[in-house]
Image (spheres, rainbow, N blue to C red):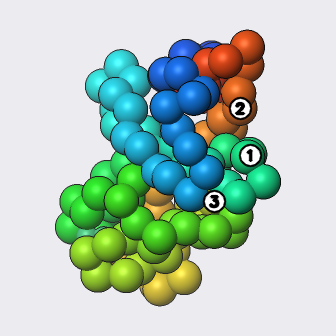
């Protein structure tokens, strides 16, 4: 079965400044959205699969986010972790649309 992704507005674009990550509640999930220095967005599950760390509070660049608790990194491209056995997060497409942040999930 193929997953169907629907666009969901999670908040105002102006509330997420460059260099910031923020967690949003989407249905029964927590999704972290990050604004890159070029203004683009990345999105991933907000809860670290290792031990529940808050990924929205982690350091990030366009390639990956680093969990603030034990510093495991998760790639935005596929959600995978560079360290084997840690698990993976789901990643999502995210974009600004008419002043709002939209996540496809
Ligand atoms: S809880 Fe995220 S790396 Fe441990």
Return the disc, 3 or 1, that comes first in the chain's sequence. Answer: 1
Q: On the rendered structure, is 60 left or right of 24? A: right
Query: Label 3: how many residues lie within 10 Å, few (<14), some (14-19) or many (20+)?
Result: many
Q: CA distance from mark 1 to mark 2?
A: 7 Å
Q: Position of residue 14 (x, y in %)?
A: 57, 29
Whole-Å distance between the Cαs marked 3 and 1? Answer: 13 Å
Residue 3 is drawn in which quadrant? top right
Q: Is mark 1 within 8 Å of ligand 1?
A: no
- The residue that label 2 is drawn on is 95
Ligand 1 found in image quarter: bottom left
Q: In the displayed image of the protein, which residue is found farthest to the bottom?
A: 83
In the image, residue 84 lies at what x, y percent? Answer: 46, 84
Q: How many marks?
A: 3
The local secondary structure at tag 3 comes to loop
- Foreground: 97 or 76? 97
Q: Which residue is mark 1?
A: 40
Verify CB contact (< 8 Å) between mark 1 and mark 2.
yes
Q: Which residue is mark 3?
A: 76
């Amino acid at each position: 079965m193929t997953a169907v992704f629907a666009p969901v507005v999670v908040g105002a674009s102006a509330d997420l400044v460059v260099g910031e990550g923020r967690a949003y509640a989407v249905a029964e999930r927590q999704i972290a959205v990050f604004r890159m220095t070029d203004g683009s967005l990345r999105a991933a599950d907000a809860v670290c699969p290792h031990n529940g760390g808050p990924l929205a509070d982690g350091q990030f660049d366009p390639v990956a986010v680093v969990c603030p608790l034990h510093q495991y990194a998760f790639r935005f491209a596929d959600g995978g972790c560079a360290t084997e056995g840690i698990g993976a997060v789901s990643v999502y497409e995210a974009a600004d649309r008419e002043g709002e942040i939209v996540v496809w999930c």
